[in-house]
Amino acid sequence: MIDVAVVGSLHLDIMVAAPRLPGRDETLVGSSWHTKCGGKGGNQAVAAARHGARTAFGGQTGQDDFGDRLRANLLAAGVDATHVGSDPAQGSGMSVAISEAAGEYGAVVVSGANLTIDAAAIVARWAGLWEAKVLLLQNEVPEAVSLAAAKAAKAKGAQVVLNAAPARAMSDALLGLVDVLVVNRVEAAMLSGEDDMAKALAALHSPTRDVVLTRGGDGLMLMTRDGRRTDIPALAVKLVSSHGAGDCFCGAMAARLAAGDGIEAACRFATEAAGRFVSAVQKT
């Protein structure tokens, strides 16, 4: 049985090291670059697998070298890529990310084939995914795809975890199927209309949904569906790079939920995993 099914995006990231992000109309000299397999969906699937979950992925690439590399990366991490399709007319998703010397970063994403997944076809085509214990979603594929996946997995008894990144408006239909909502400060403010994070947390909570609000080095705020709030501090580490930290957190948390942990225990485990991740030099 699959522990964690991830439906989402695959991008080949081009990582550029620079002293800072460039300003408008500025040409800035960087120091190095390398490629890295990413996309929030792909990153979270790899993280779930590395934290012990039997993980399978549903998504789409182009028929190109980037797509070949993205599939190979999933397989190398132990992720079942049976349900990764290919679009002959669209290139694979990609991004260019600039990493600052202090460890922060900014990125531009071109979604490509991630946007051409046929939401009407996946319920039957990806039927093997819906038996998972946990379904993990993000906002880098069309909402119709996430909604179809959530309905199919929920009908089979899966917990549905949605990482609402990047920030975008979402329908009540999708949010109503979510058991665990994960947001950062930007996403929390956009979805709730509240700049105060405690108020945002309360606004996003519901009697059927736990909310996890991640705040980087400031740790996280958790409100469980019974209305109880718990603050969990970040692991005290020296930051090397924050790129991919949120994806590591979500994958690790999903792995522990699938293993039977409650939401607080899963968040504590994932917080430590993300802390170790941001303090290490990541593989390319």
Image (spheres, grey):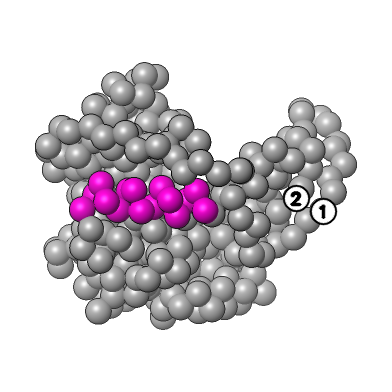
Query: In percent of the image, x 36 and y 19: which residue is there?
Result: 196
The x, y position of residue 95, in whole percent, is 64, 53
Quadrant in the rendering for residue 194: top left
Can the viewer see residue 137? no
Can the viewer see residue 19? yes
The relative height of residue 13 versus residue 191 in the rendered view (above or below) is: below
The x, y position of residue 122, in whole percent, is 32, 69
The x, y position of residue 17, in whole percent, is 76, 48
Q: Which residues are magenta?
A: 262-276
Kindly identify the amino acid type of the residue bearing the numbered disc 2: Val
Q: Which residue is mark 1?
A: 32
Q: Which residue is mark 2?
A: 16
Label 1: few (<14), some (14–19) or many (≥20) C-alpha neighbours in 10 Å: few
- Helix, strand or loop for disc 2: strand
Q: Looking at the image, do the residues carrying marks 2 and 1 touch, with CB atoms under 8 Å apart?
A: yes
The relative height of residue 94 versus residue 17 in the rendered view (above or below) is: below
Tally of numbered tags: 2
Quadrant in the rendering for residue 104: top right
Name, please, the residue furthest toward the front. Answer: 236
Side (left or right) of 237 relative to 117: right
The x, y position of residue 35, in whole percent, is 70, 62
What is the spatial separation of the Cα atoms under label 2 and label 1, in whole angstroms?
6 Å
Side (left or right) of 237 relative to 98: left
Quadrant in the rendering for residue 130: bottom left
Q: Main secondary structure of the magenta part?
A: helix
- Quadrant that contains the C terminus: bottom right
Is residue 128 part of the magenta span, yes or no?
Answer: no
Kindly identify the amino acid type of the residue bearing the numbered disc 1: Ser
Query: In percent of the image, x 78 and y 56: which residue is there?
Result: 33
